[in-house]
Every structure is written in structure tokens, then in C-alpha cells.
Image (tube, rainbow, N blue to C red):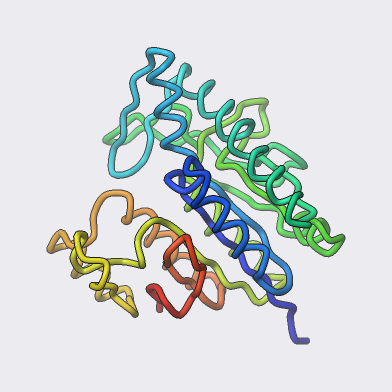
Amino acid sequence: MEKNCITVVKVGGAVVEDSSRLSELLDNFCKIEGRKLLVHGGGRSATKIAAALGIDSRMVNGRRVTDAEMLRVVTMVYGGLVNKNIVAQLQTRGGNALGLTGADMDVVRSHKREVKDVDYGFVGDVDTVDGSRLADLIESGVVPVMAPLTHDGKGNILNTNADTIASETAKALSAYYDVTLVYAFEKAGVLADSDDEGSVIRCLDKEKFEKYVADGTIAGGMLPKLENAFAAIKAGVKRVAITKDTDLEVRCGTMIE
């Protein structure tokens, strides 16, 4: 049986703290035809608020180290300030939006990351996403807006990379829909030269990815984004694109193969 289509859009923290860019992105998000779901970050806002509270931020390989104090900050910022601002703005555009963390409806369950080379603290690695419950919401006309917070089923909130939330959610929904996953951020796509917006790598497969990582072309926060993109394709997501947050045009960015 042919599946309905859904678009899962992930938007980063640089966009959500820029009111004009966020407004443009939400305008374009609402123009996407059919079913849709939005996953947001908020790391820059969390860093800024943490600094105001005298709490240092530490990043390793593009991922935030989350101690007990930082966990309180990201819970407030991601699940409250950022999430509800986006939900409120979608309502003004006619989107029947509902903000969710992973703990809501038990929709994303995770476990605390094992300590290996780095102790990331209260960071969660996803175990399950309840695609069935999300599909029920979506089929009732709801647009889920998911914050990058999960839970372990034992009463603990865990900070989880938003790119991972997007990838795992897209994978779970692929059992019910033909899924397009779009990573929208401040660049035009994956760039061969980080200073040249015209150097977009239009198609990227695993072999090219590994080559670019080895020579340093791809590094930092782009690494987890692409790792999650390849995992989504392998798990049955139909299309993954990394593109500019102001247009959401899949064909204009980098397509993951």
C-alpha cells in the first residue's frame, strides 16, 4: 500500500534565536504541503543563558557536555523558552502545533550515555521513538514540535542531540510514511570550503563523507548531523537533505545518498 508523505524538518539553535530568520523559516515550513513535523535545537540560547547564570558550557566533537546544572538550563530553555515560542508562532500561521519533549506521551526514551573517552554527563542516547503515537497525533491534524530532550523511563530527563532526535524520529515514522528529512541550518548545505557559500557539495555518499572527514573538510557540528543523516537513509528514510534554513528547498542543498 502506498504511504502518505511526511516532511521532518530539523532547525538549529542559530535560527531559533534570530527572530527574523525564525519567522521566515516558519513561513516556509507552513508552506510545505501535507504532513509535517518540526524538531528544534537551541544550543546557542542555552549557552547564552547558562553564561548569564555563571555556568560554563563545554562542547566535545560538536556535542554538549551536560552536568546537573547544565541539565536544568537545557530543560528550561529547550522544553520551555524555545519550544513554546515556536509553538506560539506556528499557531499564528494556522498550524495546529503541539510542543513535545521525549518524556511527553513516552514518545522518545533513551539511556544515559556510557562513559568512554568522554563523560558527557546527563546526555541520552535514543533507545526508542514511538512512531505509532506520533502518527496518531499527526493523523489527527497536529503538527508536533519536538524539543531535544528525552527521558530514561526512571524519572530522569536527558539532553539529546537535536540532529539525533530528528533522525530517530524520521526512522520511526518511516514505518508509516514516505519520509523526507530536512536538516535546515545557516549554511546553503555541506560546504567544501566553509568560507564559500557557493561550494555546496550537491550529493554526498558514505565514501565521500569518510574522505572529507579524513582531510578535515567536514568537522565539528557537521559530523553528528551527517552521521545521523546516513543512519536515517540506511533505516528506510526516503530522502535526506541538508539545506539553508531560509528556503527549505531540498534541491538547493546537499542530498545524502
Residue 218 placement: quadrant: bottom left
Q: Nearer the viewer, residue 220 or 196?
A: 196
Q: Taking 240 as reference, is 115 left or right?
A: left
Q: Where in the figure is residue 182, as x and y percent of width and height?
A: 51, 66
Residue 137, above or below 40: below
User: Where is the N terminus found, in terms of image quarters?
Assistant: bottom right
- Furthest toward the bottom, the residue is 1
Q: Nearer the viewer, residue 243 or 115?
A: 243
Q: Residue at (29%, 37%) from the top-left corner?
A: 60
User: Where is the C terminus found, in terms of image quarters?
Assistant: bottom left
Q: Residue at (54%, 37%) from the top-left corner?
A: 111
Q: Where in the figure is residue 87, as x and y percent of width and height?
A: 70, 45
Q: Taking 173 as reference, is 215 left or right?
A: left
Q: Nearer the viewer, residue 249 or 161?
A: 249
- Furthest toward the front, the residue is 20
Q: Taking 150 as reference, is 2 left or right?
A: right
Q: Let me know if residue 29 appears in the view.
A: yes
Q: Let me know if residue 125 appears in the view.
A: no
Q: Residue at (58%, 48%) from the top-left corner?
A: 127
Q: Where in the figure is residue 202, as x and y percent of width and height?
A: 33, 79
Q: Where in the figure is residue 161, as x and y percent of width and height?
A: 47, 44
Residue 67, above or below 141: above
